[in-house]
Amino acid sequence: MLLGVKKNLLRLGLLAGIMNSMSLPTSAFGSGLQKFWWDSRLIIIFSPFTLNNDFNTQTRHVESSVSGLVERHMRIVKVVGRGPVKVDGLIDTTLNGLKLRTEYRVLKKQFSVILIGKDGDEKGRWLKPVRLEKIFDLVDEMPMRMNEIYERGG
């Protein structure tokens, strides 16, 4: 009888833990991106592999918009296959691609682009390549960005 009670308590504890983790915001899982919050906006590009047409198209969009990225304090995070995570083209050993995929609920065979604001919240998600002008328009409407423009005298 005591063994049955212990099993039920264990099940309840596991169920409570699962339910609790489902209700947490995605930023609560701690993938390591917190180090960028309040300093940079992030564009996270997920791709199953480097020879993906969507990934290559998105990379061209990014490369043609560097000045807009710099102006808006944006960094590019690439999570490609099982390879290392890169931030602005450099490997970042503090980030884990599997954790990022889990946190942002992106399947390993899925292409996705996610915009993360300086506050760490997801601001946009696209399943196909997106022109950075569209992302810039979205960012430029954000209160924090409007404040940055105002403080700059623009």
Image (tube, rainbow, N blue to C red):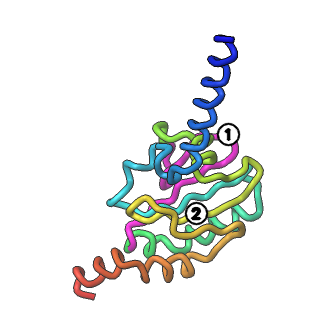
Q: Count residues near mark 2 (Cα–Cα under 10 Å), then give few for <14, some for 14-19, many for 20+.
A: many
As helix, strand or loop, the secondary structure at mark 1 comes to: loop
According to the image, label 1 marks what residue? Answer: 82
Q: Residue 42 at x, y = what percent?
A: 47, 61
**Residue plotted at (50% across, 79% down):** 138
Quadrant assignment, res 145:
bottom left
The residue type indicated by label 1 comes to: Arg
Rendered residue at 28%/88% (across/down) = 154
If you read the primary sequence from the N terminus, does the residue marked by circle 2 or circle 1 appear first? Answer: 1
**Would residue 49 be visible to someone looking at this image?**
no
Highlighted range, magenta? 72-91
Residue at (77% x, 63% y) in the render? 53
Q: Magenta stretch containing residue 121, yes or no?
A: no
Apparent side of residue 65 relative to residue 145 in the rendered image (left or right): right
Q: Which residue is mark 2?
A: 114
Q: Is residue 106 left or right of residue 95?
A: right
Disc 2 versus disc 1: distance between alpha carbons?
19 Å
Give the residue type that dot 2 points to: Ile
User: Would you say residue 52 is visible in this rendering?
Assistant: yes
Residue 110, compared with residue 142, is above or below; it is above
Give the image quarter of residue 12: top right
45 vs 141, nearest the viewer: 141
Say which of 133 and 137 sits in front.
137
The outermost residue toward the top is: 2
Position of the N terminus, as image quadrant, is: top right
Q: Which mark is residue 124?
A: none
Asked if the residues shown at circle 2 and circle 1 are in contact, with their CB atoms under 8 angstroms apart, the answer is no
Q: Position of residue 5 (x, y in %)?
A: 64, 18
Camera-side residue: 91 or 4?
4
